[in-house]
Amino acid sequence: MDLVRELIEYVKHPSVSTDPAFKEGMDGARNHVCGLLKAAGLEVEIVPTPLHPIVLARRRGPESWPHVVLYGHYDVQPADPLNLWTTPAFAPEIRQGRVWGRGTADNKGPHLVAVAALTRLLQRRPDLPLRITFLIEGEEEIGSPSFPEFLHKYKKELSEADCVILSDTASPSSDQIVITTGLRGIIGLEVNLTGPRSDLHSGIHGGAVYNPIQALTEICASLHDADNAVTIDGFYDGVQAPERWEREQLAKLPLTEDEYRRFLGVDELHAAPGLNGLEATRFAPTLEFNGIGGGYQGHGSKTVIPSKVFAKITCRLVPGQDPVFIHRQVADTIRARAPKGVRVEIKEMQGNAAYYVCPPNRPNTPKDQNPVLARAFHEAEKAIAEAFGRPPLFLREGGSVPIIGDIRRETGLDSVMIGLFTPESNLHAPDENFEIKMAEKAVVAYELLLERVAGTPRHAV
């Protein structure tokens, strides 16, 4: 399998899950990865869902063989704004040692790495004592709404596996790989304020009504203090500090705060009290405004007081925070701080996902005693060191992959998460890309990892 060639063909299918206009692209991407899995020798099942089908591909074997689930997603983010791409988002090309196009790094390139590694490994070792289940979904970028029902339906089969291995997380650079040990949880809300029954002429009616834009900005501004701490009662209750070994791993990160600041293009970082910028993105809970709108948005001036405005808010959660409690506290606080004269409607936007943690070096749940999981962590560390020339770091990540928590909750399976995109990959932004040299090394690492996990006694003490 030629990884770069297949990635280019894969990315040509515009598989934007959020927009029904891209159904043909969704179908094309799914068919493409199914063809590669069949060529590798796996049995492929297409599991229908209310939105976009899930690809389930199996390599069967005796129950005594270890069983690994490999996860990925074939859907991608919308490419907008299109005018900011150097080349069209779905016309991928190679330049500067990278493949450029929407979905190259999130997540088509990383899960094709696993497909390529398994293809090469099975050609060399067709008798490999390892059961594999590839699980590639098509709704990750819209919150995986069909995934819980799928997990419930296939719970028995998946629960018999030993662990999940995936690459949908980040590394700081292409030569310093991170094995992610924790993902922040997430909640999301859309806040809608309504003032007058229709837009008003600001000259005729200005001064008589509470402008909804003013009300919304006042509410939003009240949710943080000057030190960037969240001003919601109970928000920090129970928050658990990082462990010493986690801080020691972070200290090895080949990135300074000043380098991080320059990369972001800001004059100052604005971390919450008690943490620096690098710590805050991994260890701190947040409340962020992801979108805000209302009133006239076109060119020039239109002197209007809008009837309706909105803000989209997400909170990233850390150990000790209950997503249901935080969601309720944020919503109640916004309602309490809304001035008279505007009506508040709050919609759940993202779904609630708790923090996920899977430390490699200490027991956390009974499932952590699984010898295949322990072997996978150990061999991943060795394989990455061999393929990339330096050992990985074990770090929490600031992002959220809610389905990882769903998998653990429904099946008991924990995940080994190997970061295969970097800040330069431009995830969810124009000019997304995937570094070819990094991908080639990752194929070697995955091949070593899967070969060494094969044959691990499943009931070893």
Image: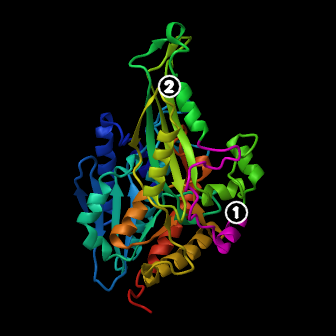
Q: Which part of the image, by quadrant, shows the N terminus?
A: bottom left
Residue 51, percent from left and from top: 27, 46
Task: Give the residue at x 43% y 33%.
Answer: 192
| Amino acid found under the numbered disc labelled 2 | Pro
Task: Give the residue at x 22% y 53%.
Answer: 48
Asked if 429 appears above or below 3 in the picture, the reply is above
Magenta stretch secondary structure, dominant: loop
Does residue 140 belong to the magenta stretch? no
Label 1: element kind: loop
Nearest the camera: 218 or 354?
218
Task: Give the residue at x 58% y 63%.
Answer: 239
Where residue 372 is drawn, which disc sits there? none
Q: Read off the magenta span.
A: 223-252
Label 2: element kind: helix
For the rendered model, the colour scheme is rainbow
Direction top: furthest residue: 204
Q: Which residue is mark 2?
A: 212
Task: Give the residue at x 33% y 40%.
Answer: 25
Q: Check whether the beta carbons of the residues at disc 2 and disc 1 lie within 8 A of each other.
A: no
Does residue 243 belong to the magenta stretch? yes
Left or right position of 398 against 278? left
Q: Which residue is mark 1?
A: 253
| Amino acid found under the numbered disc labelled 1 | Leu
Label 2 neighbour load within 10 Å: few <14, some 14-19, many 20+: many
Nearest the camera: 8 or 63?
63
Query: Does the image show residue 225?
Result: yes
Query: Could you tell me how far apart the alpha carbons at marks 2 and 1 are, in whole angstroms?
Result: 45 Å
Q: Which part of the image, by quadrant, shows the C terminus?
A: bottom left
